[in-house]
Amino acid sequence: MDKIPVGILGATGMVGQQYIALLANHPWFEVRYVAASPRSAGKVYRAAVGGRWNATRGDLGGSDSPAAASLIVEDANDVSKAIAAAKRGDCAFVFSALDMGKDEIKALEESYAAAGIPVVSNASANRWTSDVPMLIAEVNPDHADIIPAQKKNRNWDKGFIAVKPNCSIQSYMTPLWALLRAGYRVERIIVNTLQAVSGAGYPGVPSLDIVDNIVPYIEGEEEKTELEPMKILGTVQGNRITNAASPRISAHCNRVPVVDGHTACISLEFGGEKPSIDEIKRIWTSFKALPQELDLPMAPLRPIIIREEQDRPQPRKDREVDKGMAVSVGRIRPCNVFDIRFVAVSHNTVRGAAGGGILNAELLKAKGYLG
Amino acid sequence: MDKIPVGILGATGMVGQQYIALLANHPWFEVRYVAASPRSAGKVYRAAVGGRWNATRGDLGGSDSPAAASLIVEDANDVSKAIAAAKRGDCAFVFSALDMGKDEIKALEESYAAAGIPVVSNASANRWTSDVPMLIAEVNPDHADIIPAQKKNRNWDKGFIAVKPNCSIQSYMTPLWALLRAGYRVERIIVNTLQAVSGAGYPGVPSLDIVDNIVPYIEGEEEKTELEPMKILGTVQGNRITNAASPRISAHCNRVPVVDGHTACISLEFGGEKPSIDEIKRIWTSFKALPQELDLPMAPLRPIIIREEQDRPQPRKDREVDKGMAVSVGRIRPCNVFDIRFVAVSHNTVRGAAGGGILNAELLKAKGYLG
Amino acid sequence: MDKIPVGILGATGMVGQQYIALLANHPWFEVRYVAASPRSAGKVYRAAVGGRWNATRGDLGGSDSPAAASLIVEDANDVSKAIAAAKRGDCAFVFSALDMGKDEIKALEESYAAAGIPVVSNASANRWTSDVPMLIAEVNPDHADIIPAQKKNRNWDKGFIAVKPNCSIQSYMTPLWALLRAGYRVERIIVNTLQAVSGAGYPGVPSLDIVDNIVPYIEGEEEKTELEPMKILGTVQGNRITNAASPRISAHCNRVPVVDGHTACISLEFGGEKPSIDEIKRIWTSFKALPQELDLPMAPLRPIIIREEQDRPQPRKDREVDKGMAVSVGRIRPCNVFDIRFVAVSHNTVRGAAGGGILNAELLKAKGYLG
Amino acid sequence: MDKIPVGILGATGMVGQQYIALLANHPWFEVRYVAASPRSAGKVYRAAVGGRWNATRGDLGGSDSPAAASLIVEDANDVSKAIAAAKRGDCAFVFSALDMGKDEIKALEESYAAAGIPVVSNASANRWTSDVPMLIAEVNPDHADIIPAQKKNRNWDKGFIAVKPNCSIQSYMTPLWALLRAGYRVERIIVNTLQAVSGAGYPGVPSLDIVDNIVPYIEGEEEKTELEPMKILGTVQGNRITNAASPRISAHCNRVPVVDGHTACISLEFGGEKPSIDEIKRIWTSFKALPQELDLPMAPLRPIIIREEQDRPQPRKDREVDKGMAVSVGRIRPCNVFDIRFVAVSHNTVRGAAGGGILNAELLKAKGYLG
């Protein structure tokens, strides 16, 4: 089949770069439009990024450089450029990795959608818009089905907005969902994250804050970690998504001297019947969801990989598993206060950002919402 | 006053080195006897340690070298050497930083005590011996008063054993105790530690495990972190110490790429009356205990330092405060699942090891148990 | 074509693991025999390695595990096991990544060769054996042609030994050779290496030596860095290889907190005619050698990648280029003391170890020396 | 004696902070005036610095906070503020750690001097002003004697400017000078520096550039490293300083993941007579200079410490020796290309910045130029 032409908003930032890298040989999508801030506009993508390239794959200056590195960067604020690109067949939809004020992003994403260009977004700006689905493809693919209602609400013809949640929750949301889907109730979770520096973008975390150090605080991160699961586990009711009532989550978020890969230490309390450790392992090992059934290109074969070694998962050693799209889980053991404890690792800029966004787009395509 | 001559068992290891460094100019104690494994015996201390020196202060080869670096190392297994040193006035008591099998350490520490040489130990071997006090000088100085019963139990004349707990609990035990002493009941704690590599000794953690990585497992550490507080908060009843019944603690222990300084993220649930955040800050800021009243040389002026910055405490920036003996606490805020959350940092090889051992010895001296 | 069955000696160590990882989907070779120390013998490879797995690709416990992970490990000291494997068609030749005493490795590699099993080695033991070629496939592929003389010298029928040089020289030997091949004479080189911790194996460098630190010494490394180029640039004369007379090299070797990727800072003095910076860039950019002409599977498309950014190459960002097999060069500029200066980066466990060994085997196969 | 009141320009930056920390208990000087950028002006110093505090000693929020932390920050651009402070006896001279454009710093430092306030500067702006001495107190204390001529040139009454050189040369300039003073001639030096991240200030080096990485480039650093020694080794001739003609220096400057402490690897070629390694060690061990003779408070007892261990000096382990003011040297050995090689480490923000500035001020005071 012909590849679908896609655009990337915020293409020169950390997450935008990762989109460029991950889409370099994508079987369905081809990057044909890149947009960023006005000061990058007009430059060749490769030059606009320059020394800031930090994607984990490919490279702009070496022999593996993605084709999109030769595109001219447009001004992301100027929607007419994207409309023109759409008309000439270079931009069927956009991935948004915009990095500006929340209100500006919200307005700008809406402008693209209003102009008939669907937006698959990584930004947090529209996560709490009630008719915008916040998707983890393995967890709540049915939330995509609010899109017709969203279009109708806004009087949009072809455009719509779908978002993905924050990277900090990716490592434990799929395991949590697998337990819920198996019929268990989860009441309370205390989670401690050890997050990689790439999550803060570039220049991001100063080295003086992180060499021989950890920073036990990331702005806004604990709130997102506690609240976003509520919407993801919620239900589509008419033209809005209603939050779930449980579990109750408390998050401590730390920045650690790791390049890529967020680690989460979780203590979890069940309500009602409690599965055994063996039962939990069985649930997680055998867990597959719609992306696996549809055999989506970016979907991991097994969304949850269980590590039996006593000291795994670890971010540097496990983040790359299955294209960086699987979650690695280990140290599943009883908790001295709640019911169980475990450790989960996922790649924050792949599974937790660009890779997750691409998987969402694949899901939306497979469901017929994209072209 | 004349300085008290002291010995160090396991003097060439990480914690032994820190004793040498911290005691270099101590007003009460003078290191006059050093003992280690047979392969170090007979060598000058400086040569026996060689390139393994990793104490945070002083240095063996520079111009700041402690005087004890010129002592001849004896075989720690040979108690008769220490007895001879005691007779010639070079060893009134020993600090034990032995690093061998648990059963061997237990037997060896008992041999020293039986020979009339008190043992102030960092090792875990005797922590669960029922008549051995496990002391944090600010928390349970009264446990020292089991020493006469211990001597009587064992038929020991001058010798006895006192130990200190694991480094992983130092950062939150004093804050916890301050709350308990103020009359509040604590039911449950979930704690996540981010521990420095120096805690594993030398060579310890391989660099391939910790550069651009974290290891979410430390052997035996979670058990110690959950259990040791129970004895420390317990009570002396006759000739044994009875464990406290609460709080219930669950620990996740992680190794992180930090040289020195353990960080703990704590979620805490009260029973009964709950203090406000302001009340907690007032309790912690004003907390002083027996070491402060006695003005012990190694005691921090204020055992608990509250940091008001949103991103503190941090291990590299806060570990050295007040000779490395104070605990820094910050991010005191409501918990979404329990009652409060906070972050605590302490220096693991000072407050959590050699410095804590020295403070214990000072306390025992002030109480009349040492000479 | 049917794949050639190969064995790996020292298969459980760092370099052995990298062979397993890199050969997982090799078009010519298939790992069918693995051998290591007696304490690993009899175990399934996956279990024998356990938590020590540190290869940069694949994983033993995840879903990407190489097929060889299920092989039973044999005792590398027992050549009869390899002979039996060779007889049943499981071991046409071996890669040696042995890690034991130099004399033992020398004797053991000779035993394999004497038994008719060619040895393609990473070990340093036979690097200075005068009839053993020390190969960088792009630099001195003609040295392979000493193999018939070597066999005759030793009265070996099918077996022989070929080795590769130390990882510390890989980043600048190809650029140096390209200049020599273009007709320029190089008199003197002062090189400073910043070497990754993976070069020291596992457990290797203790984290206390490398977090917030560098170690300006690596045992034996400066000697290798200064001498090995002399043999590589030498000539086959009859049944031995005679060293080159120039250039004269001085090396400072440092260990730095980098996982993979050795960096070298080079000052170089020409003798006779001096090329311009532009001429040097042209020579390096266009450099291709026999592995590229033969289109060997492991050969990089372009052996030398020039980076024009002012701050490249960098180990983390450039080590993976072209399967980790290309050398990245940058900051080519006049030297204030010699003629030119530049910085070069190569992947030490791929280009500098297992990948280089595989490329050597491909070269030997293409030249008809392997089967 | 009464302490001399001093001011600090650029007091809130990295080097300014280090001045505050190092002067906290200085026997001669007392910080009574602090100035920084307009956006800090009017704030209490502690609040103006906030989370950016990165000095290696003391702390703004803990119990060890320096008294100067309570001063109100003035606008460094407004010289009249300093004049007023000087009049009320709060500012006899200033340390300049200004961080702005070079031309602005040059003009501003001259304004202070013209107003009668001597400037002891860390900035590079005036390093190449021909009548401004660039001082390393142990190397060229006689250059201070150009100050009367400088005053006369400019028609300045009390004010003058004295500067210190770049941090990158501190670790090898004193050893180099010791050899020259002993009568040996040095022709050529190739030096490779591995520089700590604190040298780039805060936020400075992004963590994504330095975790698991090194950056082989620091803007402007190689030029300074090659040129500044020429002036320092030059001679005062009339009213200007004439550069030395030798040695010729080539520098490669790298940024490494080290918090504090610059390492230099040096290859050195003598002209004429060549000292033996033993003679060199004797020269360095016994080296003392004017600061030691005058017993200046900040002067190290021995400016050069020789380490005999094969793997020292190392930045984390040696940077703090003798208040961070001594240079540690080791691995003194023959060079395969030049005559000798060695490794040198010094603390870049102490010896190489604020500590060096304070020592210069002490020297100027002792020589009668300050009050």
Image: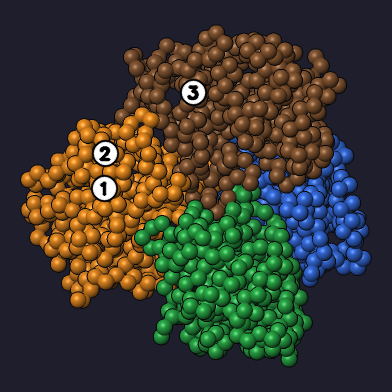
Chain colours: A brown, B orange, C blue, D green
Which of discs 2 and 3 lies nearer the camera? The answer is: 2
Residue ID at (20%, 45%): B181
**Which residue was labeled with disc 2?**
B275
Contact (CB < 8 A) between labels 2 and 3?
no
Residue ID at (79%, 71%): C337
Contact (CB < 8 A) between labels 2 and 1?
yes
Which of discs 3 and 1 lies nearer the camera? The answer is: 1
Identify the disc placed on residue A190: none
Horizontal arrangement in the rendering, residue A341 relative to residue D193 (left or right): left
Mark 3 falls within which chain?
Answer: A
- Badge 1 marks a residue whose secondary structure is helix
Quadrant including the N terminus of chain D: bottom left
**Which residue was labeled with disc 3?**
A229
The residue closer to the viewer here, C200 or D114, is: D114
Mark 2 falls within which chain?
Answer: B
Q: What's the residue type where badge 1 is placed? A: Ile
Marks 3 & 1 on one chain: no
